[in-house]
Amino acid sequence: MIPDQFEQLVVDAGRAIGRSDDGGIDGVIKEDVLGLDTIYVQAKRWQNTVPIEEVRDFAGALLSRRSVKGVFITTSSFPSGAHDFVASIDRRIILIVGGRLASLMVQFNLGVSVAETIHLKEVDYDYFGA
């Protein structure tokens, strides 16, 4: 998957707002129907560990938009320093790696379809008055 496709994948729940010069934001998710709270999204399709500078830049992008919530998603991993950094700031940033992204996609039926449904039956004892 090319980087633009990966970015689209992670913002399908929201509205894509960024492309080449996105200011560190790839998408936005409205947390409620009135748009009172927004979650900004950054997507990076990397093979190596995402440098902590990328996470810091994303935090700065949130600050410039007066937002306190963000999700940074990568196909690779984050260094422990990135986790320490997001735990120490007043912005709430969730770091999601490839494996967790895949699990969330399955959980919320994004990019997957049901191949088979199995119905397991058991005796309804209330029906028989037992």
Image (cartoon, grey):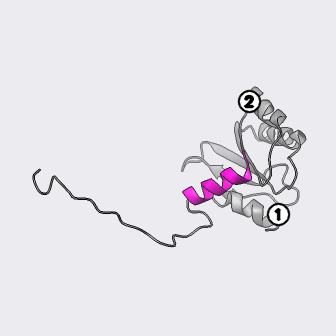
Tell me the quarter of the picture where residue 10 sits: bottom right
The answer to whether residue 101 is left or right of residue 25 is left
Q: Which amino acid does label 2 sit on?
A: Ala
Secondary element type, mark 2: helix
Tell me residue 37's x, y (percent). 62, 42
Q: In this view, does 40 lie to the left or right of 118?
A: right
Say which element carries label 1: helix
Going by the numbered disc 1, the residue's amino acid type is Pro
Q: Residue 33: percent from the left, percent from the top?
A: 54, 50
Q: Residue 3 carries which label?
A: 1
Magenta region: 96-107
Separation of residues labelled 1 and 2 (CA atoms): 28 Å
Which residue in the protein does label 2 denote? 87
**Magenta-drawn stretch, dominant element (helix, strand or loop):** helix
Res 82 → quadrant: top right
Q: Residue at x 82, y 63 (%)?
A: 3
* Residue drawn at (80%, 65%) of the image: 4
Residue 76 within the segment the image draws in magenta: no
Label 2 neighbour load within 10 Å: few <14, some 14-19, many 20+: few
